[in-house]
Amino acid sequence: MAGYFSNHSQSRFLAISNSTAATSTTSTTTTTTAAAAAAAANPPPAATPPATTRPRAPSSKHFSTFVAPAADDKAQGKDRAAGSGAANGAPAVHPLHHTWVFWFRQQRAPGNKITNYEAGIKKIAAFSSVESFWSLWTHLHPPSSLLPTTDYLLFHAGVRRPVWEDPLNLPGGKWIVRLRKGTADRLWEDLVLAVLGDQFVGCGDGAEGGPNGAGKERAAAAAPEGDWPEICGCTISVRQNEDIISVWNRSDADAKVKERIRETIRRVLNFPPTTVMEYKSNNDSMQDKSSFRVPAADRTPLS
């Protein structure tokens, strides 16, 4: 009993005369009875049985055994994609319609010309959400800080190789805009955001944005399966006296599709009507072994 009191209270308690001993005993008995009644009314919680161990998924060479049974995790991922966030407070993830890949073409030193263009291309990283894009973009050097004869290339994952001969690129071509030095950084960023942000989604013919006519047949025969957009990707090429941006599409056979792509480039980059744009098919590039050499007759103003 003395353990419930401070030293001062304890000494006062011990100083009580023996004449109050009976009263103290009665109070103690009453307190004990009340405590027993309270314990009966509120029994201690039953012991929780040990949680059953979740069976481990069988190992597979195709799937990770850690993520194979995670159906709940997939549902949480959908919630995060919808913007509601996971129950544990994780930030929401905003998925893109396609996975995109950044490539970098190594600059070649003077006197050390790379004869095989593809051999100089290096993959940087792939991303499929707004957040993963920005985490990558903030670490990329802007075009103004690159040495001449270097390229940045951005293509969706359906394009296995960012070259003319890729099955998705083969029946298509690209719009080319030549920029003065000092203007490429902002325009390149605006173009990348427009491509990722589906600003070109209405350029293709039909609901899925696919090519039309003969171009559609050629694309279907050459391209791998998949619901890929009309726009394959975009590039920027840093040169000694100019910088060149280009937008690659799947089919060069449909003049209306190409015109819509051209007008979309003009709109998203806020080009004046007098801006000269050039279109070159990838087949022509393979014939003359040049990406940007275009006859003067094919250089058309936007107006």
Image (cartoon, rainbow, N blue to C red):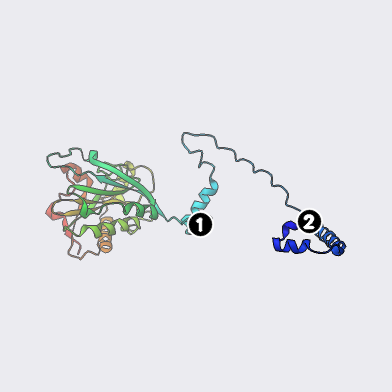
Q: Image point 54% across, 34% down: which residue?
A: 58
Q: Is residue 256 visible?
A: no
> Which quadrant holds residue 273?
bottom left
How many numbered discs?
A: 2
Secondary structure category for the residue under label 2: helix
Secondary structure category for the residue under label 1: loop
Can you say which quadrant of the picture contains the N terminus? bottom right
What percent of the width, then of the height, locates residue 114? 18, 39
Q: In the rendered view, would you say 105 is above or below 144?
A: above
Question: What is the C-alpha distance between the residues marked 2 and 1?
Answer: 39 Å
Q: Which mark is residue 39?
A: 2
Q: Which mark is residue 182?
A: none
Q: Image point 70% across, 63% down: which residue?
A: 8
What percent of the width, then of the height, locates residue 45? 72, 52
> Which quadrant holds residue 269?
bottom left
Can you say which quadrant of the picture contains the C terminus? bottom left
Nearer mark to the viewer, of 2 and 1: 2
Badge 2: residue crowd in 10 Å (few <14, some 14–19, many ≥20) = few
Q: Report the front residue among 122 and 117.
A: 122
First in residue order: circle 2 vs circle 1: 2
Q: Report the front residue among 32 and 98.
A: 32
- Name the residue beneath numbered marker 1: 89
Q: Is residue 233 visible?
A: yes
Three-letter code for the amino acid on which mark 2 is drawn: Ala
